[in-house]
Structures are given as C-alpha cells and as structure tokens.
Amino acid sequence: MAVAASTLESQAGWVALAMVRYVPVLVLAAYSPLRWAPAMIRITLALGLAWLTVLSIPETALQAVPEGVGAWIRALVGEFAIGLIFGLALLVPQAALHGMGWLLDVQAGFGAATLFNPGADNDPQSLLGTALSLAAVVLFFTLDLHQALYRGLVASVDWLPLGAAAARPDPEAFFGLLGHGFLLALALVAPVVLGLFAVDVAVAYATRSMPQANVYFLALPLKVLVAMLLFAVAIRYAPELLSRLYRDAFSRVPGMLGG
C-alpha cells in the first residue's frame, strides 16, 4: 500500500513538472496560440498533455522526484524557463508579422487615421498588422503547425528530462531567431513595401511639379488602394512563407536551450 502511494505521489510530481513546462505555451495568453480559448480549456489541455507525456516515458528513464523545497523550486524554475523558450519561438514570429503590419500601415497612410479620428490616438491599432496576425492564427492551425509545436514540447523531455533543469540558454541562437524571423516576415510583405515605395517616388515627382498642391492627401487614397491590392496578392503566398517562418523558429529551440 505504501509502495502504491509512493508511486502515485511520484507520478503526480512528474505531471506537475511537465505541466509547468507546458504552461507558457498552452496557458499564458501572451505566448499561447490558443489565447482565444477560455482559460479553463487551456489549463485542462496542458494538464492532459502533461499526463500523456508522463505516461509515455519509460519508468527507467524517469529520475528521482526532487526532494526538499529548494530542489522543487530549482526544478520548477527550470521547467518554466524551458517552456518560456518554446514560447519565444512562437512569440517572435507573431511579433515579426505584427511589426511588418505596422510598417505597411505607415507606408500606406493608415497611420494618418488619427488625423481623421483623434480619439484613436489613445488606442493605436495596426490595421494590416491585425490582418496579418489573424491570418497567421488561421494558417497556424490549418498547416498543422500547432502539432509541430506540441511534438517539439513532448520530444524535449527526451533530451531535457523532467526536473533536470539542464537548459543552458544560448544568446547567439536567440539573436539568430530574431534575425531570421523578421527577415522571413519582411519577405512576406516585400511586394507591398516595394509597390508603395514606387508610389512614393511617383508622388515625390508630382510634388516637385505641383508644389502648391497638397499631394500627400491627394495621393493617400491611391496608396491605400495599391496597398490593399498588393496585400491581397501577397497573402496568396502566405501559407508557404508562414510555414517556413514558424518551422524555422521551432528548429532553433534546441540551440536556444543549449542542446
């Protein structure tokens, strides 16, 4: 009876450690692709995935459960840090896409919306950035990228055992994630950026020939139209580029963990 109770206690400890590793990606709204789902759903999913992960690990591969408050704190902090690094691999592509949306807003003239609606100055929103983020969420699940993320989380238990706290973050790998993430996001919106640049050049020539006219506001509808047309063309190639963006980020996680 005592052996059974000890085994049950150990299993509960491993499930708790696994759940802490999954919390940043599955539960925290800032990182999770499931931020639209209720918190109870996200917590239940994290608990179920942690339980299945522990069941899939051979008993011979499980280390001893941490003993003492200090050991538990170190183990929990280590697991949470591993989960945060997985969360960064998800957050950086999202931030890159939203940043490219802000760039398009400035080029297309959507940033001038506060001139027509001063109340929006207190709550600035990126129109194209929001559109890119929503498209990314849809394609994230359509392209089964969430499965790649969860497979990586489960596979991390093999090379970073639960409770080992052996992660050694590599800053160079993190900066590589940032650089490649924003570069691939820029490739997605490059047609729109180049098209709007051509419009800006044409407007500049028009300004030199008609200095008395307010060319900026005259050209604003044209820039908005060109931006929306080119954005509609560029979004057709979004699935392949978004898949590459996220898969490249996930592939850099072992390097960021020092693996």
Image: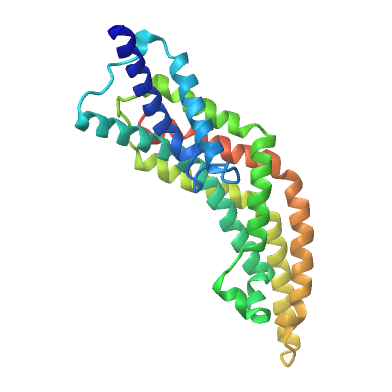
Q: Given the current orientation, which residue lies at the most extreme front position?
A: 1
* 109 w.r.t. 10: above or below: below
Q: Quick check: 9 left or right of 227?
A: left
Which quarter shows the C terminus? top left
* 53 w.r.t. 1: above or below: below
Q: Quick check: 232 left or right of 250?
A: right
Closer to us: 241 or 72: 72
- Count all numbered tags in the image, as a single digit: 0
Which quarter shows the N terminus? top left
Q: Is residue 171 visible?
A: yes
Q: Quadrant of residue 254?
A: top left
Across and down, in percent, residue 80 comes to: 37, 36
Closer to us: 92 or 66: 66
Q: Residue at x 75, y 88 (%)?
A: 210
Across and down, in percent, residue 101 comes to: 62, 59
Q: Residue at x 41, y 19 (%)?
A: 158
Q: Residue at x 51, y 26 (%)?
A: 48
Across and down, in percent, residue 97 comes to: 59, 52
Q: Quadrant of residue 114?
A: bottom right
Q: Is residue 161 visible?
A: no
Q: Residue at x 61, y 33 (%)?
A: 145
Across and down, in percent, residue 247 comes to: 57, 35
Q: How is the image coloured?
A: rainbow
Closer to us: 134 or 3: 3
